[in-house]
Amino acid sequence: MAVLVVADHTNAALGEATAKTVAAAQKLGGEIDILVAGQNAEAAAEAAAKLAGVRKVLLAQSDALGHQLAEAVTDTVMAFAPGYDAILIPATSAGKNYAPRIAAKLDVNQITDVIEVIAPDTFVRPIYAGNALETVQSFDAKKVITVRPTAFKPVPGGGGAPVEAAAAAATAGREASFVGEEVVKSDRPELAGAKIVVSGGRAMGSAEEFHRVIEPLADRLGAAVGASRAAVDAGYAPNDYQVGQTGKVVAPDLYVAVGISGAIQHLAGMKDSKVIVAINKDADAPIFQVADYGVVGDYKTVVPELMAALG
Amino acid sequence: MKVLVPVKRVIDYNVKVRVKPDQTGVDLANVKMSMNPFDEIATEEAVRLKEKGVATEVIVVSIGPQQAQETIRTALAMGADRGILIQTDVDVEPLAVAKLLKAVIAEESPNLIVMGKQAIDGDNNAVGQMLAALLDWPQATFASKIEVSGDKASVTREIDGGLQTLEVSLPAVITADLRLNEPRYASLPNIMKAKKKEIAVKTPGDYGVDVTARLKVLKVAEPPKRTAGIVVENAAALVAKLKNEAGVL
């Protein structure tokens, strides 16, 4: 058994999702290699080589790989695929983009968003936004698996695997081309991977109130900002803040829901959080049924008190 | 330019999902079904391309039971021109869906496929990318903005922490994310008009595609239930609990 993990990285740095995907790969058993497909990605490759339990790191580099374009990553992985029984890819936005393309090229059905490895061919994955967990057995000879990073603990560092230069596949010219990128330079952590998330709901009443109340609390906690669909639909918060079935699924250590009633579709996006706090003036709001700690009261008084108590 | 939009009939996003007691799946009996929300966004985008004069025809394809005709009618009422139902009661996996769509594309020769990034039942987020792979077409997933000019499309995509812009030469597959647009509600006259639009009914066999499952579902279980915690008196008590009991601050 040999497993290839395709690294999540930004060229300059290795994403934490990679170490978590290696942890999932260890549960499959066998030798584990990591492919870093990027450009000027030596630093990411060296970080990957330090992960415990890795046999070797393959570093493939080209302009197209530098932007993680799906066509280029797929063609590069395809060159190595014959040597592996399973290809594991972190279910980050980059991984989700290219993994199914690799699966289809190999004529296998992808096993998506795995949260538990039961056997090398049997996995647990969430469906219906986590409202049900499906145990599936794959009949494909070669497995293409995306791994939900929040479900696995990262493997430690301390390893010393060799880094080998590997060939980047030349693409045939039928690929998308990179035009530009606009990464928001925010001091706040990214919503999907944040350890703490503070979300606001429709009770905010306006975009101004959302900024005034939710953002300072998030900044005080070093948290990412989220919102319910109701708040997004009402225009209080941008759509990429949305936590829920049709937005982002998050599982932080602490999730603070302010003025969110707890509609099913919102709960689907945050109920795997370790600790949930709800602040709502309606004691019967469904959010309290999933919250570990609740404060029944108007956010207008509770949030300032909370800021004061945090010091 | 023809635009093809695949749409899926799924459990309505506002319905509480219940796992069957025998753990064989999710209970879909007497449950409200709707068009997958991301497919509504894709349909809206295709209809807007037609309204702008970029697209000449919008074709909607669904793979599913006979009732998926209703989902196609919804898209027709939004402004799509005609529909194709590939009727099957089998739960068709993403790879087989992509193969069926490839076969439809071979017959219809559309220049652009716009589809939802994922269905909210299986949550695979796979068919668009798989279809692009099988066709060897460029892909632009998780689109929040699409601008078509001539034989190219500029697509702004949602990536972790921001946006990326790609240019794809057509034909191409584009998958829709939430921010792409806000789908319209169909007006009553348009709902009436949609009843007269054509829906061709086919089967997977008509396209010679093997839809045998590659994955066997061993069981479907409820996730571990959260139990309601405690209500604390005030913010100070909350902070104390979070620091001392939960250890998250």
Image (cartoon, coloured by chain):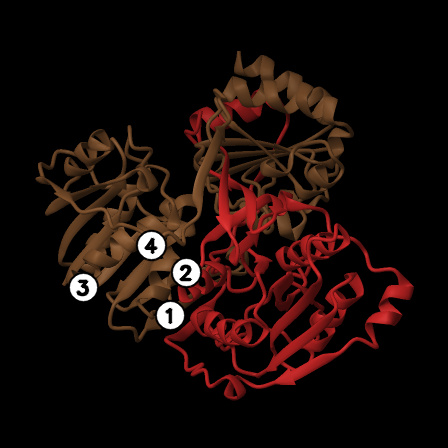
Per the model, the C-alpha gap separating discs 2 and 1 is 8 Å
Residue B145 vertical position relative to residue A295 in the rendered view, above or below: below
Residue B110 versus residue B225 in the image, above or below? below
Query: Which of the two labelled residues, at mark 4 and mark 1, occupies the earlier sequence position?
Result: 1
* Callout 3 amino acid: Pro
Residue A136: numbered disc:
1
Question: Which chain contains the residue that carries disc 4?
Answer: A
Q: How many marks?
A: 4
Please give the chain letter of the residue carrying mark 1. A
Q: Is residue A165 above or below residue B122?
A: above
The residue beneath circle 2 is A125
Q: Residue B192: which quarter of the image?
A: bottom right
Q: Pointer 2: residues within 10 angstroms few (<14), some, or many (20+)?
A: many
What subunit carries mark 3? A
| Residue under the point 75% across and 78% down | B198
Among the two numbered marks 1 and 3 on one chain, the one whose residue lies closer to the N terminus: 3
